[in-house]
Amino acid sequence: MLAFVCAVAAKAAGPYDNPDTLFVSRDGTGQFRTIGEAVEVCRAFMEYHKVIYVKNGVYKEKVIIPSWLTNIEICGESADKTIITYDDHANIRLAETGKPMGTFRTYTVKVEGSDITFKNITIENNAAKLGQAVALHTEGDRLVFVNCRLLGNQDTVYTGVGDTRLYFKDCYIEGTTDFIFGPSTVWFERCTIHSKQNSFVTAASTPQGTPYGYVFSHCRLTAAPGVDEVYLGRPWRPYAYTLFINCELGAHILPAGWHNWNNADNERTARYLEYNNTGAGADASRRAPWSKQLTKKEAALVTPANVFKTDTSWIPAV
């Protein structure tokens, strides 16, 4: 009888329904050739931590982490050589309707699930400059990105759902216009933020009742050669919140720092803040008068625990 029960249990369990690591490799030496295939075998609402280890290679695929998946870590062999890439952009015509694709279908990676981690990997949208082209689109809560490269042009990173919490550490993010945008609450720690043309870095759309939006801590803002007129942000929605604290701001940052998106009413509601920044772009003497320089006491309150309003055990140690 015991042997029968064990046999039935073994047959019922999926071959990948365990906490072990799954291996992905384009050359066929792993269990899977695509990341999407590995994601498909993960059990819904896992209570244990499963790693999808991705060997170096270029993976041309649109990856979706669905909402029913949790506790997954997608870890690349190396950030520079493990690359997920696609090339959709907003003005591609959909075959079924003939209408433009629009911004929010252009993602290379879309993360709907919560408690998901990405490490040591590149996520790229390499579409030509023909419209908005999202590399990373997030919807889940408690998402972590460590040592990742996020590459694109306009709209590289879309943090798509209000009051979800994201943490980026030691990441490189590049783009042209509004290349970090959306309503989520996000902490960027020691990231490099690279502008590829004269435009805007952020376009937060923080909801009115949400106390924090984008916090950039100890980040470096750099630019491509010839780029010398970049704003820190403009408000996609009236209550946009963006703070740069203890950051190094390059000479490409304009003296005004912030833009009102051609709507003076945004100046009454947008929350644009700075504290203790350095570099040629950090001079606050000519900043937009409706932005704010925090006091030391105010800045001391800006911690991950206060920003996320929750247990921060899901955030990797600094």
Image (cartoon, grey):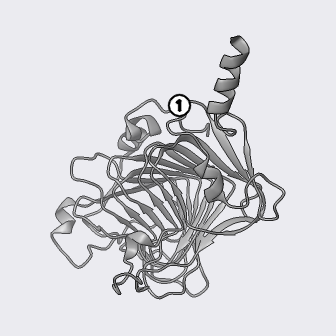
User: With respect to residue 190, does 157 lie above or below?
Assistant: below
Q: Quadrant of residue 261?
A: bottom left
Residue sitting nearer the eye, 121 or 235 = 121
| Residue 139 appears left or right of 265 | right
Can residue 301 be seen here? The reply is no
User: With respect to residue 96, does 7 lie above or below?
Assistant: above
Quadrant for the N terminus in the image: top right
- Mark 1 closeness class: few <14, some 14–19, many ≥20 residues within 10 Å: few
Residue named by callout 1: 313
What's the residue at 54%, 87% (across, down)? 128
| Residue 45 appears left or right of 13 | left
Q: Position of residue 134 (x, y in %)?
A: 48, 71
Instruction: Name the outermost residue toward the top.
Output: 1
Can residue 265 be seen here? The reply is yes
Residue sitting nearer the eye, 126 or 268 = 126
> Which residue type does callout 1 highlight?
Ser
Quadrant for the C terminus in the image: top right
Residue sitting nearer the eye, 242 or 296 = 242
Q: Quadrant of residue 256?
A: bottom left
Q: Position of residue 52 (x, y in %)?
A: 68, 48
What's the residue at 31%, 58% (across, down)? 292
Q: Position of residue 65 (x, y in %)?
A: 52, 53
Q: Position of residue 118 (x, y in %)?
A: 61, 51
User: With respect to residue 193, does 16 lie above or below?
Assistant: above
What's the residue at 40%, 44% (across, down)? 299
| Residue 282 appears left or right of 8 | left
What's the residue at 69%, 38% (across, down)? 15
Secondary structure under the numbered disc 1 in the rendered image: loop
Looking at the rendered structure, the number of numbered marks drawn on it comes to 1
